[in-house]
Amino acid sequence: MKSTLIMGGARSGKSSFAQELALKSGEAVLFVATAEAGDEDMKRRIEKHRETRPSTWKTLEVTTHVGSQIARSIGKAKTVIIDCITLLVSNIFQQYDGDADADVTEKGVVAEIDELIECIDRLDASFIIVSNEVGLGLVPADRVSRIYRDLLGRANQRLAQHADEVILMVAGMPVKVKP
């Protein structure tokens, strides 16, 4: 099986493209959502995302330990969408209080990504992983934002190195980066 990492900026079409790829596979799909509804805006966004997914897809909502949760929940799915790494890293950042000890938080992020990569290698399924590219803009003005950007960038690099295919979404258009 193969893994595809889809990256891009906010509203670049990453999630829609990931769903299109999954539909084209014709396989049973496990959709892994990493968002937490912390406020009304996020609740609306989550609900809107739910409405765009086929009802036949199984959904797993999980904020951390994604790899082990997928392994327990995959069932008959042969395609797994993880949407998204951006929020997964944010969840870990909040769990470890990333501002207080960036090194400890980084170890948590690395452990999470390594667990996910092990899951990808172990399971007989194709993985479509969605993440934001946050390193193309200005350097954030505050320390907390810089730490988060750096952690997400490292997570994306690890996933991209492992992925069979990397796609960058630009204005709704997929641009093949790897191979």
Image (cartoon, rainbow, N blue to C red):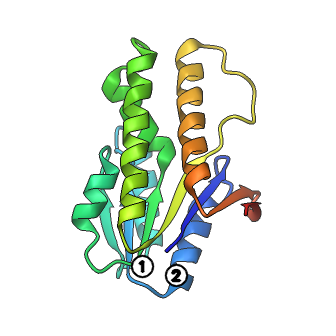
Question: Can see residue 40?
Answer: no
Question: Can see residue 66?
Answer: yes
Q: Residue at x 54, y 21 (%)?
A: 147
Q: Quadrant of residue 113?
A: top left
Label 1 sits on residue: 54
Report the disc number at residue 23.
2
Q: Is residue 47 left or right of residue 153?
A: left
In which quadrant will I find the C terminus? bottom right
Residue farthest to the left? 72
Callout 1 secondary element: loop
Q: x and y percent of residue 5 in the render?
A: 59, 58
Q: Quadrant of residue 69?
A: bottom left
Amino acid, disc 1: Pro
- Contact? badges 2 and 1 (CB < 8 Å): yes
CA–CA distance between discs 2 and 1? 9 Å
Amino acid, disc 2: Leu
Q: Residue at x 34, y 77 (%)?
A: 77
How many C-alpha atoms fall within 10 Å of the one at disc 2: few (<14), some, or many (≥20)? some
Callout 2 secondary element: helix
In the rendered view, would you say 49 is above or below 124?
above
Q: Residue at x 31, y 43 (%)?
A: 64
| Closer to the eye: label 2 or 1 | 2
Q: Quadrant of residue 93?
A: top left
Q: x and y percent of residue 167 in the render?
A: 69, 60
Q: x and y percent of residue 117 in the render?
A: 43, 53
Q: Residue at x 61, y 42 (%)?
A: 157
User: 72 or 141: which is nearer to us?
Assistant: 72
